[in-house]
Image (cartoon, coloured by chain):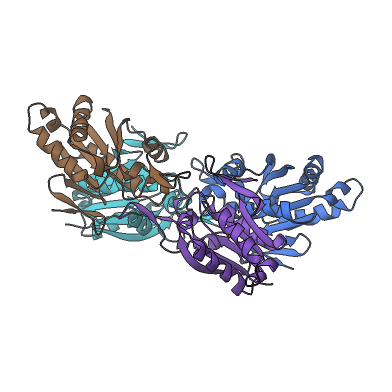
Chain colours: A brown, B cyan, C purple, D blue
Amino acid sequence: MSKIQIIATGGTLDKEYDSLTGELNFPQTHLPQIFAQALVTAPVEISPLMALDSLQMNDSDRQMIAKACIETNAHQIVVTHGTDTMVETGKMLITLGESSEFDKLRGKTIVLTGAMRPFALGNSDAAFNLGAALMAAQTAPPGVYICMNGLLHSADRVQKNRQLGVFEAQ
Amino acid sequence: MSKIQIIATGGTLDKEYDSLTGELNFPQTHLPQIFAQALVTAPVEISPLMALDSLQMNDSDRQMIAKACIETNAHQIVVTHGTDTMVETGKMLITLGESSEFDKLRGKTIVLTGAMRPFALGNSDAAFNLGAALMAAQTAPPGVYICMNGLLHSADRVQKNRQLGVFEAQ
Amino acid sequence: MSKIQIIATGGTLDKEYDSLTGELNFPQTHLPQIFAQALVTAPVEISPLMALDSLQMNDSDRQMIAKACIETNAHQIVVTHGTDTMVETGKMLITLGESSEFDKLRGKTIVLTGAMRPFALGNSDAAFNLGAALMAAQTAPPGVYICMNGLLHSADRVQKNRQLGVFEAQ
Amino acid sequence: MSKIQIIATGGTLDKEYDSLTGELNFPQTHLPQIFAQALVTAPVEISPLMALDSLQMNDSDRQMIAKACIETNAHQIVVTHGTDTMVETGKMLITLGESSEFDKLRGKTIVLTGAMRPFALGNSDAAFNLGAALMAAQTAPPGVYICMNGLLHSADRVQKNRQLGVFEAQ
């Protein structure tokens, strides 16, 4: 069975409350803990690539994500990502895939997901979203997807509704 | 967008601790709470069909599940189920689908899932499994599946490893 | 049995994560939920007085707390409070008690407590601290106290160690 | 500062769900985790003495608890205990204290506490009760007490109301 690559880039999903400062920060990714709690035996490999609030992500960060998707020999990839610019990153992965430098992206199933509430704060959507994204990476055809709210969207046909905090088909 | 039918049959996923008796029981299904926490906007419809420990399920109960899968006009179905006889129910759904009375089962994607630890006790695999199963119901071809541990198995090619508490391809 | 007054002033204990803004705010006090979870039958009366980060509290706010302590007919009082200036408020209650306007403070047992991690984020010290403070209010002689870390300090002989995030005798 | 002895005897407080058997058992005491979460700096020493459902406790077990209370040089003691026979154990500690063999019990503050819902299952009264009991052990005069529901009862003047799941003055 081929491995599934999980690329962590930060986002709300991985934030934690720092008791000393009273602020939210990124200690280290909670993905191993989430997969352990879910008793995952699927052959996942977790790569912490960066730990950014997605509002602070720039094009260079997004190229780094694209490179990580190419360099892994996995064809099934989940990218955890902040929700604010998740769609922007998804669209850039589609665009980059049209260039010769990044054309290997096109043969892969890349599923972006995240959370509206950090896993570490309890009552979070993180585990559900990650379960859905891991499944989508294994069952959906090659392409770049956003997996949130129990739905799978092609990354070029979705937007975040900031008032409601959910993703909608566009 | 067509609705996705969620049929609750009980199982560990839905158990809760009763403080007065000190025992685990089935108050009412936690599925609405799990979907709310996950901010699900997918068009799910939840039907509590029964609330059984799957060791207590008999063939008549399994026929009732089969009928519920036929009677809904949904073609994407998630069945929450105790893990101990989840595979047995899955196999019976396949067998029943071969009879003329239940042949409508064959056109549907039916995904059985559950949990090794009740959702209500925290640190549970329930939300992850349900996220994965909801996605599988939308992305996998018609058939009967077991979705556990981040993997999707055809129901006739999987078994539960009771020592490890995980499902394995057979 | 005489009632025990619980005066909520905000602080970390009562903060919650806002999924839409990604920030911590004060929705409404979690004290009723904490007491319900603890199956409290002690005759507590909860008064939400203000909802402030204690770094934003000024002398006028502290006088309002003093007045609330006087105006209740309860002689056993718990004040939930941010940890950063909890000691400052405690000392001011002692000082005010020496004036004729506020001399009724001197006959009461006033216990300040709070939390280093919000109750709503899970894995919090809030419930433990509140249990300890509620007991101290019933068992300690009149005075103004800080109850944190399983210890009861007279408010004029304690300081917060900000590096360690704990309160120490001074 | 003198140490406070914490004697663990089991009870609901320390139970955990076993995913493989689907039953509740006693893995090891959760007291260190509860104190760590509460950021306790009070000088507590935790002794796991036994791990029993209190309905299975007999007089010999209760004598063992009495001996443990005598043998520690601490004068402030918290005993975690199942709620069903907590009062019975408390009364026996009072009775034993009247004999010459156990008369050292009389100089100590012994506080029995427990929980109606296991700490490990979340949403538990355990941390609150333990905070209250730890404070009572430090502030109440020598005697044997039951500390539950935010109240401190002398062990010979309290009973458990099994219908409501709370302790009441008798």
Give the residue at x 31% y 54%. Answer: C21
The x and y percentages for residue C46 are 54, 68
In the orientation shown, which residue stands out farthest toward the right?
D100
> Image quadrant for the C terminus of chain D?
bottom right
Asked whether, in this view, residue B48 is left or right of residue D110, the answer is left
Question: In this view of the protein, can residue B89 be seen by the observer?
Answer: no
Task: In the rendered view, tell whether residue C7 sits above or below residue B150.
Answer: below
Q: Nearer the viewer, residue C128 or D26?
A: C128
Most extreme residue toward the front is C99
The image shows residue C100 at horizontal and vertical percentages of 66, 72
Quarter location, residue B7: bottom left
Quadrant holding the N terminus of chain D = top right
Residue at x-position 67% and y-position 58%:
C136
**Is residue C4 shown left or right of residue C84?**
right
User: Nearest the camera: C51 or D18?
Assistant: C51
Image height of C49 relative to D134, above or below: below
Q: Whole-percent x and y of residue B77? A: 26, 52
Q: Where does residue C162 sit, x and y in percent of width and height?
A: 52, 43
Residue B9 seen: yes
Quick check: C92 above or below B137? below
Query: Which residue appears at 76% of the width and 49% of the height?
Result: D58
* Numbered label tally: 0
* Quadrant hosting residue A139: top left
The residue located at (13%, 28%) in the rendering is: A104
